[in-house]
Amino acid sequence: MNDEGWSRDEFIQNFLDGLFSLPSCSWCMDHSRPLYGKRLRLCSSCRSIRATIRKLEKRVGRHRRPLRSGFDHDRYELDVAKSMKMLARCDGIEFGAINTKDITGLDLEHIFNEVSRMVVRKDLFGNDALMFDQCYTLPQLRLLYYQMSRLARIRRRKYRKFRAAQELQT
């Protein structure tokens, strides 16, 4: 126990509550990046997605639809940008309010697998969900999930355009 008489779990939970009370991006709910805008607070990557969508909507609105045999690159890029916006919002839903989510060992296993695939290109934490549930309390699970999510967000943000284009092709 520390000086105030708090338990370790209370200290972790208060840390997470304080962290998630800070302003965040309106789309991806990232708390650690600088925010821009007065009405709609966005981080730089979400702001560039929004600018791309606006630019392409204006460009697509100026010209008519191409023939059936032609490929409209502007409309395709607009679809990719809208898909990137959706992926950013999905990241916000997944990582937005970790301090109040009911994180299970399975959630932690998934995020550890994602990070291990990033680092060593292998799933190192297969079938460890039961161990995570038994060894850690809920605030500890939330803290581990938050720390791993910071790494996963960076990679997801970096490859968001590629993922959006892949989703459109399937």
Image (spheres, rainbow, N blue to C red):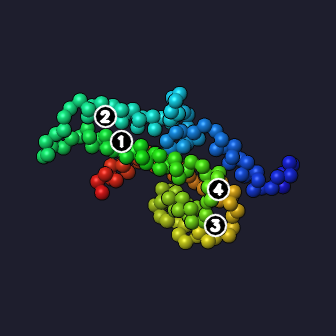
Residue depicted at 46% across the width and 45% down the height: 88
Q: Which marked residue is nearer to the observer: mark 2 or mark 3?
A: 2
Residue 116 image position (x, y, % from top left): 51, 60
* Residue placed under numbered mark 1 in the picture: 81
In the rendered view, does 105 fall on the left or right side of 86? Answer: right
Q: Find residue 142 and name its label.
A: 4
Q: Amino acid at mark 2?
A: Leu
Residue depicted at 55% across the width and 34% down the height: 34
Image quarter (top left, top right, bottom left or bottom right) of the N terminus = bottom right
Verify CB contact (< 8 Å) between mark 2 and mark 1. yes
What secondary structure is found at the residue carrying circle 1? helix
Q: Amino acid at mark 1?
A: Ala
Q: Amino acid at mark 3?
A: Phe
Q: Is residue 161 visible?
A: no
Inter-mark Cα distance, 4 to 2: 39 Å
Q: Amino acid at mark 4?
A: Arg
Instruction: Compare marks 4 and 2 and give the one earlier in the sequence.
Output: 2
Verify CB contact (< 8 Å) between mark 4 and mark 1. no
* Residue placed under numbered mark 3 in the picture: 132
What residue occupies the far top of the structure in this picture? 38
Image quarter (top left, top right, bottom left or bottom right) of the C terminus = bottom left
Residue 152 image position (x, y, % from top left): 51, 52
Q: Find residue 115 and name its label.
A: none
Inter-mark Cα distance, 2 to 3: 46 Å
* Residue placed under numbered mark 2 in the picture: 56
